Amino acid sequence: MNTERKTIDQLFQQEFSKMVAVISRQFGLEHIETAEDIVSDTFLAAAENWGGKGLPENPTAWLYHVAKNKTLTYFRRGDVWQQKVLPAVKAGLEREEPESDLDFSAQNIQDSQLRMIFAICNPAIASESQIGLALRILCGFGIDEIAAAFLTNKETINKRLFRAKEKLRTENIRMELPRKICWTPGWIMCCISSISCSMKAIIAARRIPSCKRISAWKRCAWGYC
């Protein structure tokens, strides 16, 4: 049981942000909270399944398979598909066809996470909210850990994350790479500032072990371990 638990903890740190990024890219950032819920539910299923049956031959592939099935099942429900997903497709938004399988290939994961970085660093989102969202979505930290990093309480962090996700929706922010004309000093400095502040917050967190800070730096700065 200890082996399974340690494996799940390690995989959560490594795979949470990847899976959320892929799902969010496929169905849009307005569904980012749904993506988080699906991924969390996937890890809960892993804990229940692996605890009784032992580790699968390829734990990461198992997670991707379960997350894919849960995601497609959710979005193919009549109300969600008809009222939210289908109108977005008809409106001509630049997204992959939602009915297609989720692509959890290494290339698509890295590309999705890079796009997620630019979305989170969008100037429409307040700096503190950017940092909180980066720690949650890019680094996979829990609310308690983020609160410790900011030396504040969970309620404050939840409010910041809520405001940031609302901005993603209301500003119609998409997971896309900036066009060449958008590579302005302001955009570049915004991204650098957000990542820099995120790392300062992580290092300041007294409850986060040093080895975990290094792992978080890799995830936040590069989008993958």
Image: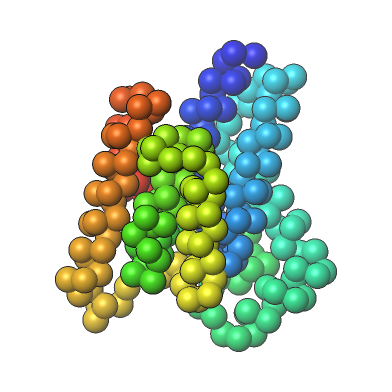
In the picture provided, is 172 more to the left or to the right than 99?
A: left
Figure quadrant of the N terminus: top right
Judging depth in this view, the residue of 75 and 68 nearest the camera is: 75
Q: In the figure, residue 78 lies in which quadrant?
A: bottom right
Q: Is residue 40 above or below residue 78?
A: above
206 left or right of 23 in image: left
User: Which residue sits at x=60%, y=56%?
Assistant: 33
Relative height, residue 26 to residue 89 (above, below): above
- Where residue 187 appears, x then y in whole percent? 25, 69
Q: Is residue 225 visible?
A: no
The residue most toward the top is: 2
Q: How is the image coloured?
A: rainbow
Residue 176 at x, y percent in the picture? 41, 70
- In the displayed structure, does residue 135 sit left or right of residue 11? left
Percent position (x, y) of residue 217?
A: 30, 40
Quadrant for the C terminus in the image: top left
| Closer-to-camera residue (80/166) | 166
